[in-house]
Amino acid sequence: MENEKKLLVIEDEVAILTFLRSSLEESGWEVLEARTARLGLDLAAKAKPDVILLDLGLPDQDGLQTLKALRQWTSAPVIIISARGQEQDKIKGLDGGADDYLTKPFSINELMARLRVAVRHGNQRPEDAPPLYEHAGLKVDLVGRHVWLKKKEIHLSPLQYDLLAVLVRNAGRVVSQSQLMKEVWGETRDVTPELVRITVHQLRHKIEPDPVRPRALKTEPGVGYRLESSDE
Amino acid sequence: MEPKTLLVIEDEVAILRFLRSSLEQSGWKVLEAKTGRIGLSLATDNKPDVILLDLGLPDMDGFAVLKALRQWSSVPVIIISARGQEYDKVRGLNIGADDYLTKPFGIPELTARLQVALRHAEHGAQDASPIYKHTGLKVDLATRRVWLRKNEIRLSPLQYGVLAVLVKHAGRVVLHGQLMKEAWGENRDVTPETIRIVVHQLRHKIEPDPVRPRSLKTEAGVGYILEASEGDS
């Protein structure tokens, strides 16, 4: 018997939740429910589901925002389930990091087949970095998007935060300049190595006690940058 | 960015033409196969990054093509089919397709799904854990060290190079051509015979019984496969 897989459903329609729970539990899934994005993000961090089903029309947040927040720290497979069947929505969802997009109404059999595909992909993914990073007085909470230096919360621009988040996800490993450009700025063509350097420079002034002698965010000359591993 | 290769196994010329013109514009290199048989052979020879597979092919059922592919390749496959029935979708996804798109579909959605497929392939190829373990063989790619039954063993640079390529693709067949390219680089005069010799030497070092290899298997006529690392499910 296969291990029971955990599914997190972030969806506010009770009828759909009930329907999903009854059909999926029967076929061996453990189903967790969250009716708001906030609860969903919280459960995703605590319960580490194998797959996440995400509705786009949530009461407290647009689902695409929720997806973006999830992708800051987890590569768990996400399947969007939405009544919005427009091509534009699908593209935004898939480009935003969703693994699949299913338009409501969908059949439970197709959903189950797509869940199995998601599990296959999930098995191959690298393990998520722990969502809480701590080193040399720097603390980053990828789930809540908070950053502290010596217990004082500090404010970063979205770009500075995104760059830091990429480094936290790869803590202990060198991240090349081109990888940073791609992950932080996306496919935009008008990002230069100079811009990366400037953003790192700004970031160091906020997160390093002594920006000239960085203790967390190190430069690997000619290669890229490395954030020291998180303390145990 | 180097262009990604897409193999389209599809017999309708109108669709082939349509896909080629739209996808080449967005930087894909498009290969075409109008039969399942040609598709399988192109998939072997050209190592596409993604495959689009039609179900209604003249010579073979699309499901059979998919099954054959999955014998040796984990390349992402997106089925494109006019059959929008639940039964076909479930069957296709269950036997190893990564996605299923019902015709007619828009190019923007296809492009977005192709990007998803590439993301998945990237994860697969990295095969995250840098320590490889299988039946007593242990390889640490980060430090370039190799052990057999806890004893460290020494390999020549070439032997290590071949082993490292196989570890990176553990669980999947590495074709002769690919192995030559990745282990020797582009411009060396290496023959299939050289590979056989290096693999032979390697087996004597990493296999408890080189004649009955348990990790480094030969896929006759195709290439080599190193069994998947233990602990990777």
Image: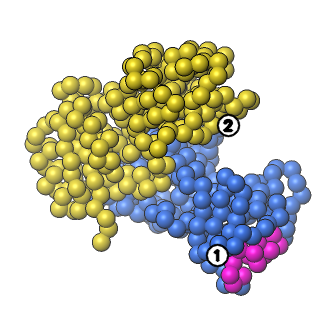
Front-most of A226 and A125? A226
Left or right position of A14 against B100 = left
Q: Residue at x 63, y 37 (%)?
A: A174
The picture places residue A196, in percent across and down from the top left corner, at: 61, 20
Dot 1 alpha-carbon crowd within 10 angstroms: few under 14, some 14 to 19, many 20 or more: few
Q: How many marks?
A: 2
Front-most of B162 and A94? B162
Left or right position of B38 against A87 = right
Q: Mark 2 lies on which chain?
A: B
Q: Residue A229, can we see it?
A: yes
Q: Which amino acid does label 1 sit on?
A: Arg
Q: Is residue B102 above or below residue A71?
A: below
Disc 2 and disc 1 on one polypeptide chain: yes
* Chain B: drawing colour: blue
Q: Which residue is drawn at 72% across and 69% down?
A: B152
Q: Name the residue under label 1.
A: B149
Front-most of A63 and B86? A63
Answer with the quarter of the image where residue A171 lies.
top right
The picture places residue A96, in percent across and down from the top left corner, at: 41, 31
What segment is highlighted magenta in the picture?
Answer: B195-210
Dot 2 alpha-carbon crowd within 10 angstroms: few under 14, some 14 to 19, many 20 or more: few
Q: Is mark 2 on a helix, strand or loop?
A: loop
Q: Residue at x 22, y 35 (%)?
A: A39
Q: Mark 1 lies on which chain?
A: B
Location of the N terminus of chain A (image quadrant): bottom left
* Chain A: drawing colour: yellow
Question: Rounded to the nearest whole Å, what is the CA distance between mark 2 and mark 1?
Answer: 41 Å
Q: Mark 2 points at which residue?
A: B2
- Magenta span contains residue B38: no
Left or right position of A92 against A43 = right
Lower sequence index among marks 2 and 1: 2
